Every structure is written in structure tokens, then in C-alpha cells.
Image (cartoon, rainbow, N blue to C red):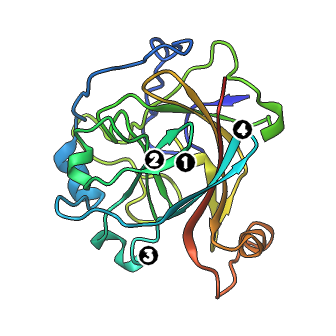
Amino acid sequence: MVLVLTLFSCTEDPIVEDSPRDSGGLAVCEEPVEPACVDAMILDLALHDDKVSDGAVTNTADGDAWYTSVDATAGGYGNSSDNPWVYLRFTDAGAERVDIDDETALESMDWDLAARRFILRLNGGDSGPSCVGAATLMEQGWDDVAEAPEGISYAVDDYYTDDCTMVNDSSGLPGSPQVVLGPWWSYSACIATTGYVQLIQLADGRVVKFVVDRYYEEAAHQDTCNETGEAPQAATSAIYTFHWQLLP
């Protein structure tokens, strides 16, 4: 099964974009398009125009794939609104941090993914001016996906109504929009990882196979959360580990 929406329910269905996202590796878009609800997004997502994240981004090769660690702590849950997002782009040499402030990012196609605490945005739709989209594969594991399935469609972030009211996911957490990468996590008393493989189509048409391996810094702490529904008190959150690969 291929899922192109988030797991969380909402009052409005996100728009799923079909063609021209089935690009066969050709560029999907080449010019930026301003998101429809910029003013609302600046307020709702606490975007800054005077700060650039210095969150550490490190890569470890895994054959043709990568494990990328991203510090998206943003000062901790209570202080995240006072801190900027971390912006990344996927390259043949690993994921690179893009040193850009939040408001400038709304005009830039140089980034692919933005992270802050438990929210992952893609550069497209309501989140950015590019056309980066994603689909979630619910029945395939990492080793089952060698290429993007033929005819797959990718959805861009679509969490604003026509009057620019933000659609929250059903996690119950404040300020959590219904982003297309939402299926990577579930929530009870901690952030559990689902392990779903997600395919991210970049603006140039290339596709990234992507799994959020950990949200908590230590693997044992993530395992405890996944198995018991509670994270250890010592767990450090929002130090992501992404497992990803550019597909042929």
C-alpha cells in the first residue's frame, strides 16, 4: 500500500498532487512559487528573519545510503518557538545543512527538508516555494525498496485551508500541522517511530528513500519509547537519525 497523506485525521483532506510529479527523474520544477499563506505560517510556526540554526548535521555512510544525525532540539520543547528551523538538502555526499533564516527559506529552493522538534516540513506546497513532495510506503521495509514504484504520486505539504487556517494533526500537540511526512511518528507519552519507508521526490526529479530511524539521541531510549509508550527520563529528544538513500 502506498500512502500519500498523513496518519492523523483532520477536518479537511489534503490535496494529493498527481501529474506532473511523476517526472521519471526529470526536473519537477525550476522556479520558486510563493506559498499561499506566508503571513499565517510565520505566526503559526514561529518563523524568524534574524536567526540561522547552528544545529549539528553529521553523516555516516552506509554503502550507497546514509545515516544522518540532525540536532533539531531548538532549545527544547518549551523554547522551540524562540529558535529557527534546521534546513537540509540531500546530496550525493550526504545531507548538508543550508544556513538560511526561516523567512528567507520561504523564497529559496536551496533546501529540501526542514526540522524543528517533532515536525518535518518539505520545501513545497504550504511549507516552501519549491515542489518537494513525498509518499509513504506502509507495507514495504527498507530492503524491499530498490526504486520508486512505477506510477507513484507524491503529495506536497498542504495544511492550510483557503482562509489560511492551519489544519493540525490529531496528535493533540499544539502547533503541529498536518505535514505529509507525518506518518514517521506516533504519540502517546513519547514520540515513537513507525519505521515506515517514505519516498521524497526532490525538485530535480530524483527520489530519496527515507526513514526516521530515531527521534531520541540514544537507540535504547527510542526502543524503550517504541515498546512501552514512554521514554526514559534521561532521553534527549529531537536529535534525529535519518536513514536515507538517493534511488537510481
The numbered mark, 2 or 4, whose residue comes first in the sequence reads 4
Give the label on residue 182, or none. 1
Coordinates of residue 227 in the picture (x, y in percent): 81, 69
Alpha-carbon span between mark 3 and mark 4: 34 Å
Classify mark 1: helix, strand or loop. helix
Q: Mark 1 belongs to which amino acid?
A: Gly
Residue type at the position of mark 4: Asp
Q: Taking 200 as reference, is 212 above or below it?
A: below
User: Label 2, label 3: how many angstroms apart (C-alpha)?
Assistant: 18 Å
Q: Are marks 1 and 3 in contact (CB under 8 Å)?
A: no
Q: Earlier in the sequence, mark 2 or mark 3?
A: 3
Report, in whole angstroms, how far the alpha carbon at label 1 lies from the one at label 3.
18 Å
Instruction: For mark 3, give the secondary structure.
Output: helix
The residue lying toward the viewer, choosing from 20 and 113, is 113
Mark drawn on residue 64: 4
Q: Residue at x 46, y 33 (%)?
A: 13
Residue in the picture at 37% in, 34% down: 124
Q: Are marks 1 and 2 in contact (CB under 8 Å)?
A: yes
Give coordinates of residue 169: x percent, y percent. Answer: 48, 52
In the picture of the structure, the residue carrying the numbered disc 2 is 178
